[in-house]
Amino acid sequence: MDPVVVLALVAAIVVVFLVASSVRIVPQARRYNIERFGRYRRTLQPGLNLVVPVADRINTKLDVREQVYSSDPRPVITEDNLVVNIDTVLYYQITDPRSAAYEVADYLHAIDQLTVTTLRNVIGSMDLEETLTSREEINSRLRAVLDDATGKWGIRVNRVEIKAIDPPHTIKEAMEKQMRAERDKRAAILHAEGERQAKILTAEGTKQKDILEAQGTQQAMILRADGEAKAVELVFQAVHRNNADPKILAYKYLETLPHLASSDNNTFWVIPGELTEAVRTVTRAFGDQPAAQPEAAAGAGADHTSDEGRTPELDAGWTASSDAAAAADEAEKEAAAAVSDAKAEAEAAKSPQTPRRGQTPRG
């Protein structure tokens, strides 16, 4: 082969290699750190970039998108000397590729260790109860410390989240018992409140019922009393308007005597003290003259005994007085018989085996 052709081929190969070595294409959201003869030269941006062949080389390729880093659970001691395992989730982003490559050897390991030490400082000043209920405060303090420390590394910590806090198994059992006791307490309180409200409502209903019944009874008694008062008033007006005869009044008085023993619950009877006066009234009613007239007639008869022509008038007066006395005795007997019959009927109603007055027992 001709040596000239060989040299031309070698020269072409060298040119192609040099051109290929001088061209660098960087993808989007990537950053390449270029070193020239072992010293940092510049950071290549996304797109087509030219470098010096052989002299320049790529030291690190970094992703500037937001990254997520989840750490393993780490034991942390609380203020009340309880060991809890805490694992965190870290959201970070590289803002300066040069510092991330040359200011720290392994930024992920550095961030992880810084997170653990910060957690121990923060959790060490809290008890278990406060640790479980103060996640937002812990996250804020962690982010402030990490952001301040990683700023010089060219990294920005956007967010720090505590993924889990695992207390010891015995503490979990105690917490479950405590929560169960709290729930039982709330259930008992709610049940007691329900019973209390039910009793209050029942009492209110009973009260309203008693009040309404009392008001109904009151209204009924008032109406009954008004009716009786009006009836008495009408009877009184009718008696006085019609100027009733003493015979009718005396008869009505004696007619009410049998009703004294009409009730089945009566064990004794009260006879009015005006019974004698009623009998006298009947006597006056059925007699032709007042009760005091016989005495006057007797006096008049004595005065006129000397007069032979007036003897028949004296006999007639005594005859009328005798009729009145007989009528009074008859009325008294009828009243006594009516009372006796009423007593007998009441006793017969209480004990059916006892024969009534005037009846013979069955045989």
Image (cartoon, rainbow, N blue to C red):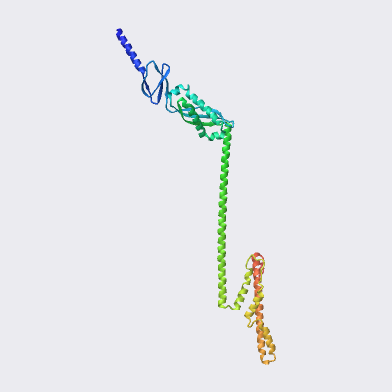
Location of residue 48 by image quarter: top left
Q: Is residue 1 visible?
A: no
Q: Is residue 54 left or right of residue 227?
A: left
> How far across and how far down the image is residue 228, in percent?
57, 69
Residue, x 68% and y 84% (percent of image)? 295
Nearer to me, 169 or 32: 32
Q: Residue at x 65, y 88 (%)?
A: 313
In this rendered view, identify the residue nearer to me: 25 or 266: 25
> Which quarter shows the C terminus?
bottom right
Q: Is 237 on the left-hand or right-hand side of 151?
A: right
Q: Position of residue 127 (x, y in %)?
A: 57, 33
Measured from the top left, where is residue 166 in percent x and y?
54, 31
Give the quadrant of the N terminus: top left
Kindly identify the residue that appears in the image at 63 percent across and 71 percent down. 258
Q: Is residue 135 left or right of residue 23?
A: right
- Quadrant position of residue 326: bottom right
In the displayed structure image, the side of residue 12 where residue 87 appears, left or right: right
Q: Is residue 299 above or below residue 274?
A: below
Q: Can residue 281 be seen in the rendering of this structure?
A: yes
Question: Where does residue 241 sit, x and y in percent of width and height?
Answer: 55, 77
